[in-house]
Image (cartoon, grey):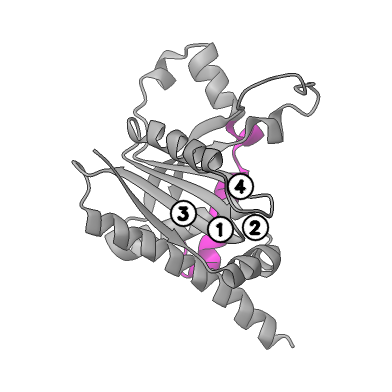
């Protein structure tokens, strides 16, 4: 049974995150989100190493020399990541640890799908799917309110992931607010546990914002 919960930043917090925090940390949004998820897992469950599946847009990184202007469909690049933040002693160190591991993935992980599904690599085919899935859908609103189609598309794509991943996190920029849609199987997870984890992730993101805000005030 698929259940939903939503957590989000305010518009002002989102603007600060995108325009100030990420540049100050020299980090991308997905790296900040992974840091927040890692911090929440450490705080709530004491877990400092975990598998997560990342979903990136295949067009963005892998087809610069290929003309896809007449192609109809949705490109995506999905690959697992083992994230270990056990060596981090504070939030800033955790960001750097996450950045190092994410940026160490060759070609943004495109080779994983090629090996697993095109070459039918038996070792990769035998690997279990991670229990967490992070799918950054980006800004679907284009400065206007989300249409019903856009909401349904994001929801449908996320629900597909729940059948294989037990917790699916879809990230949207909805009317200027960073929104995380959590979908999970209630037969496996308690609603309160998932809601607490979702709230904890938002708390971690706000801690990242506060970290860079304090640093900028110190240098004024």
Q: Secondary structure at mark 2?
A: loop
Give the quadrant of the C terminus.
Answer: bottom right
The answer to which of marks 2 and 3 sits earlier in the sequence is 2
Q: Secondary structure at mark 1?
A: helix
The answer to which of marks 4 and 2 sits earlier in the sequence is 2
- Name the residue tied to disc 2: 27
Return the residue nearer the eye: 28 or 10.
10
Image spot of residue 172 (x, y percent): 54, 50
- Name the residue tied to disc 3: 180
Residue 209 location, quadrant: bottom right
- Name the residue tied to disc 4: 138
Name the residue at 66% across, 21% down.
72
Q: Which residues are magenta?
A: 87-109
| Contact between labelled residues 2 and 1, with CB atoms less than 8 Å apart | yes
The answer to which of marks 4 and 1 sits earlier in the sequence is 1
Residue 194 appears in view: yes
Name the residue at 64% across, 80% down.
215
Per the model, the C-alpha gap separating discs 4 and 3 is: 11 Å
Per the model, the C-alpha gap separating discs 4 and 2 is: 16 Å
């Amino acid at each position: 049974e698929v259940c939903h919960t939503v957590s989000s930043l305010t518009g002002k917090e989102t603007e600060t995150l995108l325009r100030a925090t990420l540049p100050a940390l020299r980090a991308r949004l997905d790296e900040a989100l992974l840091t927040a998820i890692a911090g929440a897992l450490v705080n709530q469950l004491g877990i400092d190493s975990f598998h997560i599946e990342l979903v990136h847009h295949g067009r963005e990184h892998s087809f610069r020399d290929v003309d896809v202007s007449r192609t109809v469909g949705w490109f995506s690049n999905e690959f697992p990541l083992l994230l270990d933040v056990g060596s981090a002693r504070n939030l800033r160190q955790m960001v750097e640890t996450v950045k190092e591991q994410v940026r160490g993935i060759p070609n943004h992980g495109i080779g994983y799908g090629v090996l697993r599904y095109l070459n039918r690599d038996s070792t990769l085919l035998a690997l279990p799917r991670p229990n967490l899935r992070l799918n950054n859908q980006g800004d679907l609103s284009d400065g206007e309110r989300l249409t019903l189609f856009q909401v349904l598309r994001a929801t449908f794509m996320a629900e597909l992931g729940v059948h294989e991943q037990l917790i699916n996190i879809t990230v949207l920029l909805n009317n200027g607010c960073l929104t995380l849609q959590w979908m999970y199987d209630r037969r496996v997870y308690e609603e309160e546990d998932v809601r607490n984890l979702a709230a904890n992730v938002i708390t971690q993101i706000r801690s990242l914002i506060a970290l860079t805000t304090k640093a900028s005030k110190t240098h004024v």
